Amino acid sequence: MKRHETLPLVPIQRGEGVWLYDFDDRRYLDTVSSWWVNLFGHSNPRINAAITDQLGKLEHVMLAGFTHEPVVQLSERLRELAPAGLGHCFYGSDGASATEIALKMSAHYWRNSGRPQKTQFISLQNSYHGETLGALSVTDVALFKEAYGALIFQNATVVSPDSRDAAEGEDARVFALRCAAQLEVHLQQHHASIAAFIIEPLVQGAAGMAMYHHAYLRRARELCDQYQVHLIADEIAVGMGRTGTLFACEQAAITPDFLLLSKGITGGYLPLSVVMTTDAIYQAFYADEVARGFLHSHSYTGNPLACRAALATLDIFAADDVLNSNRAKAAYLNRVAAPLRVHPKVKNFRNTGMIWAFEVDTPHADFAQRCFSLALEHELLLRPMGNTVYFMPPYVISEREIDFLIGQTLKILDRLGC
């Protein structure tokens, strides 16, 4: 909060498409989709219409002993779209809630299955899965968790397949499998006490958009099957088309035991999260004994307004052939970004789907803050992580707006002097 004495909050009055406007009508291109949530632009008329229609019918009812049409429809749509076998949906309020639900459900499954000793979890180095206490226990970003170390159940991490760490000249797939071999060693030694392995498929967001080869996911699925450990795919940030397919797991042709969705699922409109799981896990809780049930709830679980926003979002994917359109836009941005890729201060320029990132060689410890402030002067909303600059724009970005984004970013790098 003290930082805002010199870096005032930016008051936003309205949004339209990829743009945010302040009260002086200055505009900012939302290059980060308002923390990775907005898919089809601000004030999207189709999502607006769906929510408005729902407002006239039902704003909310609890999902304890009740149900409603939007949540049933959304569950059925997700079942049809998700990797095969994920036929059950459990709803929460946000991404961290989805992580908490999956961790609890995994451990409780093993308890109900006569293996109560399986209470440990593993995650990748530099992983991020949320900031509630359970989620922090599988998050490996010191800035977020060190202050709460005494409150957190500590879990192990395994080396990340982040392609930036590959040896010079080493193929990304070969490096990913080399990292997977270390996962295998850990599972060999500790599988009896491990409930689940949680992973962000293809891209580790808070690690600076660490990207890796899908061979790691495929091998992780094989190892989790071999050692009877659940695989939790955290697609909170990378799902809903961000990596080029609707779900990142599709690129490895795997089905996780748990699939976590949030952020873009409502098009960036309303908080909603979903944990999708298999019939085998569902059946472990299907019993007369109350203690065997999964006793977890949120007041606004499966909110009808949020579910209608999610249904409208899925409708847009289908009607507009969004995934193919995104591939064309990604190819265009990569062409336009050629000068950025070869900029003398830019390193590790990389792209997966509708996510781009690069590191800036800079001596400035406060680079992220300087870049953010200068970007606002150039009509961009950029939020670097350390010296990593990334783009994750709404899918409705036009070629003209892509030209603007790249051109302004080059100006910012030149102004910073790096």
Image (tube, helix red, strand yellow):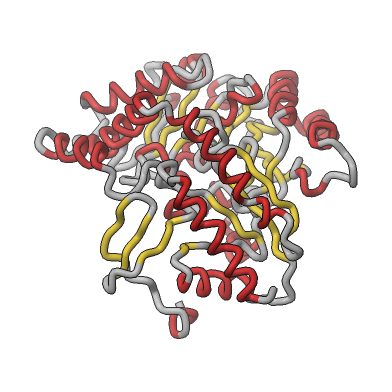
* Residue 414 figure quarter: bottom right
Q: Above or below — where is 195 with respect to 372?
A: above
Q: Above or below — where is 337 with respect to 217?
A: below
The N terminus, quarter of image: bottom left
Q: In this orientation, which residue lies closer to the viewer: 261 or 102?
A: 261
* Residue 172 figure quarter: top right
Q: Name the residue: 45% across, 24% down.
A: 292
Q: Name the residue: 74% across, 52% down.
A: 348
Q: Above or below — where is 159 with respect to 361?
A: above
Q: In this orientation, which residue lies closer to the viewer: 209 or 304?
A: 209
The C terminus, quarter of image: bottom right
Q: Name the residue: 62% across, 51% down.
A: 337
The location of residue 398, given as percent across then percent down, is: 43, 45
Q: Above or below — where is 330 with respect to 227?
A: below
The location of residue 142, given as percent across then percent down, is: 66, 61
The location of residue 117, given as percent across then percent down, is: 66, 31
Q: Residue furthest left?
A: 56
Q: How many marks?
A: 0
122 horizontally vs 180: left or right: left
Q: Can residue 274 be seen from the camera position used here?
A: yes
203 horizontally vs 31: left or right: right
Q: Name the residue: 49% across, 57% down.
A: 404
